[in-house]
Every structure is written in C-alpha cells, then in structure tokens.
Amino acid sequence: MFFLKKRRIVLSFEEHPRLKEVKFSLSKIIKNPLSIAGMSIIFLYLMIALLAPTIAPPKYEHEPFRIPHEGYSIIPEPPAPGHPFGTTTKQYDIFYGVIWGTRTAFRIGFMVVGSILVIGVVVGSISGYFGGIVDEVLMRIVDIFMSLPTLILAMAIVTALGRSLDNIMKSLIVVGWPIYARTIRGSILSIREEDFVEAAKALGANDFTVIFKHILPNAIYPVLILASLDIGAMVLTAAALSFLGLGAQEGYADWGQMVSLARNFIVGPPDQPLMYWYVVTIPGLFILFFVLGWNLLGDAFRDIFDPKLRRK
Amino acid sequence: MNFLNYIIRRLLLLIVVLIGVTVVIFILMALFSPAQRASAFITDIKQFGDIDSIIRTYGLDKPVYIQYFNWLKQIFQGNFGWSTTVSRPVIDAFKFFFPNTLELALFSAPIIILVGIWIGSLSAVHRDKPVDHFTRVLAIVGWSLPTFWFGLILLMIFYGYFQGLFPPEALGYKAHTFVNSAEFVRYTRINSIDALLNGELWIFVDAIRHLVLPVITLTVVQIALVMRIMRSSMLEAMGKGYVLTARAKGAAWKTVIKKHARRNALIPVVTVSGWLFALMMAGVVITETIFNRKGLGWWWARAATQLDIPSVLMAVLFNGILFVVTNLIVDILYAYIDPRVRLG
Amino acid sequence: MGELILDISELKTNFYTYEGVVKAIDEISFSLEKGDTLGIVGETGCGKSVTVLSLLQLILPPGKIESGRIVYKANGKRINLLEQSEPFMRNVRGNEISMIFQEASSALNPVLNINTQVSESFLLHRQKELCESVLENLSERVDKSKRFSRLFLRCLNYRYKKKLRKAENNLLKHGHYGRLIKKDAKRLTIDLLASLGIPNPSEVIKRYPHELSGGMQQRVVISMALACNPNILIADEPTSNLDVTIQAQILDLIEKLKGEYKTSILFITHDLGVIAEIASKVIVLYAGALVEFAPVRELFKNPLHPYTKALLNSVPKLERRERLESIRGNVPNLVDPPAGCRFHPRCPGVMDICRSSKPEQIINRTHGGQVHSVACFLYRNTKAWYEN
C-alpha cells in the first residue's frame, strides 16, 4: 500500500480542488455588480441592526423592541425634531420602529432559514441516500406540504398556535423545509451514482461518512442558493402575516406591523391627499430594500453557481 | 384509452393528496381545545348554546383517529361548520365570497401569463441590451416588493391623490345597491360579467374601475416570476441546434423566434404555472384585505385573526384541491405542447 | 481547372467573451470549384464549424466576422456575401447554400413534426412556384367542373389571383389560400423524402423527431438542406454520431446526390477515412489557421505540414503495424494564441522564425499540375519541397 501513501503526500502540496472552486466563485462574486449592490445593502442593514442601541436609544431598558410612544392620539404626526420619520397612529415613533425592526427582520430571516436548512438537509439526505420506502414516505409528505401555498398554510398554523411573532417563525419553518428536502434529495440522487461515491463505499466508508464527507459537500450548492433567495422571501411572508394581524402585540418593532398600523392613514383629507405619506412609505421601503438586498445576492449566487452559466 | 388511464391515475393521486391535506388539517385541529373544535361541527347558530352536547356527540374527547373519521364523515356530508366571522355556515360563505375572487383571478391570470411571457422573451431576444437590463432590474424589484405595502401605495396615489380614480372594494355604493336590487339578475354572481349580461354598462365600468388596483397588485409579483423563467428558458432555446437549423434554412430571425424557439421555451413556464395558481391564492389573501374586496382572501384573513377555525380549514382544503386540479390541467397542457411527453 | 463557385479570402472571425477575444479563425483563404467536393479537416475546436457558419453569416453575438471576402459566383454574377444585406442572405441560406448539421437529434425541433420542419424550406424559398402550381390546379378544377359551378369557381379563382398579386410577401397569412399552398408544400415534402430513400414518407412526415431512429433523423436533416436544390451544400460532420453502417449509407446518399444535382460540397469532418472516401480536395485547419491545401490523394501520399503529418500518423493503418503517434502538447487557447505559427509549440521541426512571424501560404504544383499549398517555413525554398 505504499503507493497510496505516497500519492497523498503529493496531493497535499496542491491546492485542494474544493478550495480552488470556492476561490473561483468568490472572485466571480466580487466582480459581479449585482452581488456588490446586494452585499452593500445587506451590510448597511447589518450596521443598522448592530448599532441600533446607539442610533435609537431604547426608552424601556428591558424591552428594547417596544416602540416608545408619547400620548394616545390616533392622528399621525409629521417628521419633527425628536421624531425624524414622524409618528404613526397612537404616536409610536416610526424612526425607532424601523431601526429596531431591522433586528427583528434579521432574527426572522436567519432563524427561519437556518432551521429549515438544517431540517431540509437532514430529511433530504436520509430520503435521497437510503431511497426505498423511507424515500417514498418522506417525499409524499413533502408533496402534501408543497401542494399548499406558503402563506395560507402558515396562516392556518399561526391561527392554531396563537398569534405571536415566534409562532409566525415556527409556522414558516413548518412550511419551508419541504422544498429544501426535495432539492437536496434531487442532487443527492444524481451524485449518489457517481464514481467517487462508489469508490468511497468500496473502500469501506460507513453511511455517515459517505453522506457528510462525500455527498453533501457536492450537493449543497443548490440549497445554499435557495437559502440566500429565501431569506428575503421568508422576511416578506412574515411581514405579510404581521400585516394581516397575526404577529406580535401592538407596539412591537416589526416592519409588517408598522405598515398595518398605517392602514387607516393612507389617504389624507381631500385638500391634502398625500398628507400622511411617511406613515406607510417609510416602513415599506425598509422591507423592500431588505428583501431586494437578499434577492440581488441570491440572484448573483445563482448565476455564479449555475453550471450551465458558469465559466462563460 | 391511454388518456383516460392517465386521468384516472391523476384523480387517484388527487385523493392521496387530499387525504394528506386533511391529515395536516386535523393535526392543526388537534392543537385547539375541544370547545373550539366543536364549532367545526355546528351548522346553525342556535347550536352554539349547547357546546358540551356537541363535544359528546362527535366524540371530541375520544382518541384522535376516531375524531378524524368523524370529522371526515362530516366533510363528506357537506358539513363544513359555522363561520363566526361572517355569521353563516362555511359552505354558504364560500358560495358568497367565491365569485369576487374568481373575478379577480380571471382578470389577473391572462395578464400574468401573457405579459410575463411577452416581456420575458423580449428580454431574451434583446439580451444584454438596455431593454434586457431594464426588465431584469424590474423583475428583481417586483419579486422583492411587499405586496401589502405596494397595494397601499397604489391606493395612496390613485385613490387619494387622483381623488377616487380607482377606488377600493368591489363596487361603488350606487352600483352595489343596484346589483343587490330585484332589477338585476345575478347569473354568475361575478359583477363585471353580470353587468354585461344585464346590459348595464355603467356597472361594468364601475366594476372594472374597482378591479384595476387589485389586479395590478396581484400581477406585479407574478409577472416578475414568469418573466424570469421565460427569459432563461428562451435563452436556452435560442442556443439550441434547431434554431441554427432554422436560420440556415433562411428563415427570418423573427420567424425563428416565434415558430421554433418560443414554443420550446414555453415548456418550463407551463410546468410552473400550476404552482403560480397557488401563489395567486396567497396573493389574493393580501390583495383583498388591502382593498377591502369581499372575497375568499378577505374572509380567510379575517377568520385567521378571529380564531374562526372552520373557515381556516376550508381555506386549506380549498387550496389543496385547487393545487391538484390545476396540476392536472397543467399536465394535459404539457403533453399538448411537448410531443415527447405522452400521457399514460 | 474548373470554374470557382466560392472564393473565400482572408476571412477572420472573433468571439468577444468574458475571458477575452477568442480569435476563432484567422485570415483563412480557400476556394471551392463547381461540382467539386472540398473536405475540411481538423481537430475539435479548430474552427471548422465557425468557418462555415461565417460563410452563411450565421455567427451570432458575441461572435463577429471581422474582415475578409466571400465571393459567391452564380448565374454569371459575382457577389461578395459579406457585403450583402440580411434579407439577401436569407434568400441565399437554404436556397443557394444550405447546410447539414452534425447532430440530427438536436438539429430537429422536438416540438414540431417532420412535415412542418421540412416543408418550411419550400415555403420560404419556393413561394412563387407553389402559388403557380396551386393556381394551375384551380384552373384545372374550373375546366373539369360542371357548367353551373364553373362560374362560381371562376370567381373564386379570380379572387385567389388577386390575392396572389396583393400578397407577394406573406402568402401564408391568407387563410384558405395559405392552406392550399401548405398542402402543395406537403406533397413536395413527401416526394423529397421518398427520393432520399425514406420508406413510407407520407406516414413519416406526421411524426415527431424523437419517434425516428438516428439514421432517419439524419436523412430528414439532409432533406431539409436539399429541399431547394442548393448550389453549395455544407455538411458539418453529418456522420459523426451514427453507426458505421448508417454512416456508409448516408455517405452513399451524399455521393449520389452530388452526381444527380451537380452540387458543390463543403464536407467538414475530423475523420480522415471519410475524407478519403468523399472529398477530392482537402484543406487542413489548425487552431483557426489554414495549414495545408491539397488534392486528397496528394495529401495522403505526400503531406507537407508537420501538423498534417502528425494527424495522418495518428490514424491506424492496416498495412503498417506500428505504434500510433499522438501529437504532443495541447490545442492552444485561442484567446491568446501562440505568436507566429500557431503550431510552433507542438511542432517537432520548430525554428526561430516560427516563433516570431506568421507563415505565408507557399503554393506549388504537383506533377499532375494540381495546386498544393502549405503554410510552413520549412518549405520556404522549393528545394526542401522536393526533398520531402
């Protein structure tokens, strides 16, 4: 067996092919204007989220997500010193709300997509690798989940669990994992037949090693692209559920809810129809750009990792 | 014969999916207290006084699988329960709300598909030209747009700034009264179509005015999606050998695109169009809520916030059926477009 | 020496890709005689297909024909194709110069039936003839008909004639009339397929490409190219994906057609055996440059360019039992081709001059008086030529 050892020494001097591939992808990402735009937007939001306590010091020390409000007047007030974006109905400060809402958005995006990524990868790997009856049962479950629109199923689950932001997140996890499972299963099925997997098996690697060391690193790209596109989509769906009134209690820093609070003040009095523009426009733009940032990044990822478009 | 076989197989699949969906629904139901669940078995408002006897009759304290069969039996008997949000049986509420949603879908679906395909192929044909860059940016912004916010902004501009040009709700006050009066025959219960059938043009115009903003809100996101799929599949088709063959035959570029590339490029669009319908129903929930248009979506959204379980379950069941049926239609269309696919 | 039908000089095509400008073909000059078969040989990616696609101006962005002249001579006129407008080229493509593609399965549109695809050629280039034959049929119908319906049919006929005059450009759009033309085109299609030895053509035209075998598909592709009796037929590796027996049948078919219609053929292949069988003259391409031109027998007997020699040595021969030689090194990246002669990094007889300047074509005549030219500095003085 000495020649095998010898070969391994030679290989270790070369750059690992996977590392090389990642380097190539990174160079592509840095050159792509869309991904730069996306990354800048996300970086900006990240800064806002991290610096939230400095930008908008919380009024209630232990509940920083509660938006401070002065008085209970229903009529929104226009931007003024102290309230740079004005106040919404019941005098909640819009500026404070959107700044701390950034943290909420990141929490929803990362928690939901992170969880469904883990669940989806585990279920998909089991299904794709073992096949047979396990695969059949798991995929029929996936079929059933995928036959219902995300928003409606999530709505039903939140209704059952009770209204709250945490429950919105839970429902999105329940609704979101099947597509990940199916995608990863698909790529595993195609990779499972490849020679290097057969070789690894022939060398006596156990199932666990084969899945995690040989198959998953090659099958994970499509799922990662899906995930980067999904962070935006999940935040959007969560905001929609909040807007429908299924989210946190009133006054919580959450963009969807802030749009919902503004619903009665879209149209001003006849002589000044656009009087309350700031109430609805500002939180909405925060959502739009957050989602846009992730979508730009995800889109660039997809173009870069798509084998058909790659290396053109 | 082959075709019949295929339909039968698809219908069997429909039953499998529906059983799956009902199981999901039932798991959801198990999360509620017996008293809350009892409302799913109520068919008349008078029964509300006697919740305990309903719990006993339907065995809501029995093992889960017995409850499931009981519930299933009720569904097969057409008893969907009582909707507390609108104070009438769920089945009646459905009949009442469905036409408004159907009207919205009937006006939106052709726009989504035709405009999406048109812009998508335009973008592909003029690849890397200004048109292409513009539509790509538009697509990605459209895809990132929060529907609920976009609808509100549209209202702000077209209802507020332009002084009621395109108002919310389904009909204006005057038209609404007239439609519900004895003079107006409700053939289909779809406002715009009934208006034409009755020969009342002013009601038709009113209905269209009320439709403009919801249709825009509902279509913009999905046009972005169709456009994107069409663009990439069109680009793929344009690189194929048969396009070169057709050009070598001496066909004009326009003919090549229309006759050879587009039909092949449509195949992926057809594949996702079933999914598009599901997405549309989700859009309907938001759109109807914003514009206060009394349709299925409006009802379901209210039901969800007011713990009206039977209505929410109806929503899930309806969407499950819709998905399977649209996919059946999509498969038939698919076989029509792509001769390599044979049903059966 | 025969009459030239196609004379290409200094044709240059580039592709502008992300990685840089790919100099796909670099100032290639050659000509095709009327009724002759010219073979184009070379490795994959040496620019064979790009050459013929440039010829028909089928190169799409990011590709671009930079310079050169393509003189096409037909009906006593000499036309530079590169100076012609797109509508003119459309009339040339498929009508006067047509092309057979290498992979029949991808050259046929999977969603259209055979009839639609083959009759498209007739509908594009034989509109006038089709119209006339349809009108003739109509007149016959008038003559044969009974007296009372004659007037009616005459009126109908008059209407068609009027439409014909009105709609010279786009006849197919005119409902019933278009249908009659399509029917006539279908008849021509059936005749054409039958002449190519396709059994049961009226049944075959209803089918879709995936329902036909590989050889059948290739016949259909050939039929599309031959529909309008082109003056020049370009065959781009028409046999490369077929079984040997079917390959032989297809080659026989092309030979037969050549004899029948006096078509000039440009035959592209990487298979030297096929070239020996079908071509009378051969050009050898390497990395987008023309390295050698010779009559086929001369080339096999007396290859001059080091690349041609290497290429011939890499083909197994029955009479010689020796080790096959491979050409050392790789095909160069055309974004940054080697300076001077493009073959110099792989050439066994490389000299200093090869690295710096580009070799010209050196023309000589064989004993039979035929032209044999080579682009290599080894043959700068004719002495070396005869020593070889």
Image (cartoon, coloured by chain):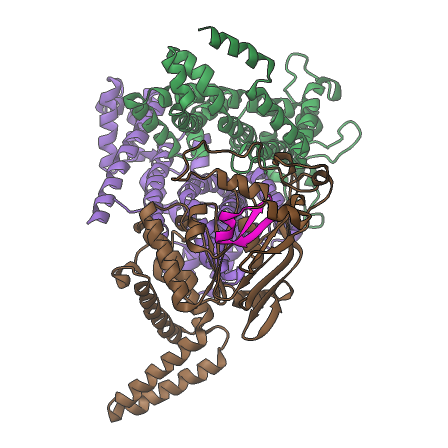
- Image coordinates for residue C190, horizontal then vertical, percent: 31, 66
Q: Is residue B25 visible?
A: no
> Magenta segment, which residues?
C283-303
- Image coordinates for residue C68, horizontal then vertical, percent: 66, 58
Instruction: Please tell me which residue is depicted at 23% across the width and 36% down the height of the picture.
Output: B76
Which residue is farthest top? A2
- Image coordinates for residue B18, horizontal then vertical, percent: 29, 34
| Position above or below: C211 against A155 | below
Instruction: Please tell me which residue is depicted at 24% across the width and 37% down the height of the picture.
Output: B12
Q: Can residue A50 be seen in this view?
A: yes
Magenta run includes residue B266 = no
Which residue is farthest bottom? C147
- Kindly indicate the quadrant of the structure image that contains residue B184: bottom left
Image label count = 0
Viewer-proximal residue, C189 or A207?
C189
Q: Colour of chain C?
A: brown
Which residue is farthest left? B1
- Kindly indicate the quadrant of the structure image that contains residue A30: top right
The quarter of the picture where the C terminus of chain B appears is: top left
- From the rendered image, report the letter of the chain displayed in purple: B
- From the rendered image, report the letter of the chain displayed in green: A
Viewer-proximal residue, A122 or B306?
A122
